[in-house]
Image: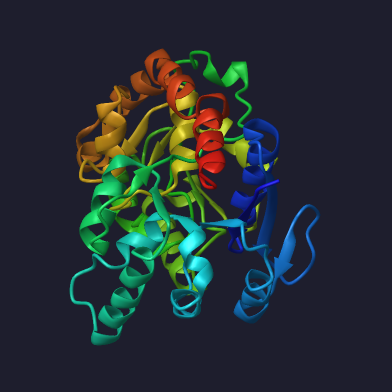
Amino acid sequence: MNKVIHVFADTPHHYHPMQQFFSHQCKPSCEQAFWVKSAAPINGFTNYENNDELFALLNNVDKNAQVVFHGLFDMHTWKKLLFNPIVKRSSCVLWGAELYRHTKAGRTIKQRIVYGLHALLINRFKQVFALNQGDAQLAQKVFKRKQVAVLPYPLIGMQVTKSDCAESAPDQMIKILVGNSASPSNNHIDALNKLAHLADKNIQIIMPLNYAGDPEYVEQVINHANSLFKNKVTAITSMLSKAQYDALLNKVSMTVFAQQRQQGLYVAYAMLLMGKPLFLLGSTSSYTNLSALGFELHKTDSLADISFNELTNLTNEFNSNNANLMQQHFTEAALAPKWRTMLQNLHG
């Protein structure tokens, strides 16, 4: 039987649900294997600790096996992969972090060399996928690759509790989720400043700062939030299980993103599925693509002009349009047939 090997980085919040999705929802007519970067064995996966171990695995795969890289962030991997013959029967799914690193102004000579290396590799892959149409178009422009297909990841295993979808009491606290990680690309300071006019209102600021950030940045964000909102800040600095994270998303009233790129799709999709307000920068591909599909979004750019009463009305209203559109476009049931077709066609 033909074989597809999925290669993941050290992203447990991603590779665990995706393995379940590919194995139980997609179920393509080909054998699948799952590799993950990890220092210790993980049930259901083949682990590799570094590039040497990864390429030892790659160099021993069956000659007909197809490889799909889910995010490629290490330039040392790019260098070794560029001249490895397996790249011609490999595909990759581009993440925002890979793409947008090459669009920053004032890049150094070293950064431009790294970009050139990445562009060469992207053009050698058999197929390249982006998670939305805007990123696909940007990838074509940045990497000079003629064809980049669009294939979103689904919202996997999100359990929505009915009580949180129901209309809230008028005097209920508004719980505002700010950002999705500790990465500076979340632009927490900017988002917090746009919420500062609500500091004396019945709100709670919740910030997941437990992933992809350095301690100095996390401390800076927490200090700034406390200076604005005092005791109304909850900073989450320890890792949560998926069940705990899903429970958190069920409890928040709305989400504010100030990222200048596509990021945090799991949170964004969860808000839309739950019919809760989602604030995004109007300049992002996420805002453009979701709006084009008919989703009702709010612009982070104008958040400072929205009153507490207006936010109360927004959070008290379940957006059935967004919930229905999520079922049509981004659930496991909606995307499993598309991923199944892609995986089966890799050997075509």
In the image, is 130 to the left or to the right of 21? left
Residue 246 position, x and y percent, is 61, 37
Q: Residue at x 51, y 64 (%)?
A: 212
Which of the pair 49/185 is nearer the observer?
A: 49
Compared to residue 286, the image places residue 70 above or below, namely below
Residue 145 lies in what quarter of the image?
A: bottom left
Which of the pair 278/22 is nearer the observer?
A: 22
- Does the image show residue 204? no
Residue 46 position, x and y percent, is 74, 62
Residue 192 position, x and y percent, is 34, 50
In the image, is 246 to the left or to the right of 188? right
Which of the pair 218/203 is nearer the observer?
A: 218
Which of the pair 178/312 is nearer the observer?
A: 178
Residue 285 position, x and y percent, is 27, 44
- Does the image show residue 67? yes
Number of labels in the image equals 0
Colour mapping used in the image = rainbow
Q: Residue at x 41, y 20 (%)?
A: 325
Q: Residue at x 24, y 83 (%)?
A: 108
Q: Residue furthest bottom?
A: 109
Q: Residue at x 63, y 27 (%)?
A: 159
Compared to residue 113, the image places residue 145 above or below, namely above
Compared to residue 33, the image places residue 282 above or below, namely above
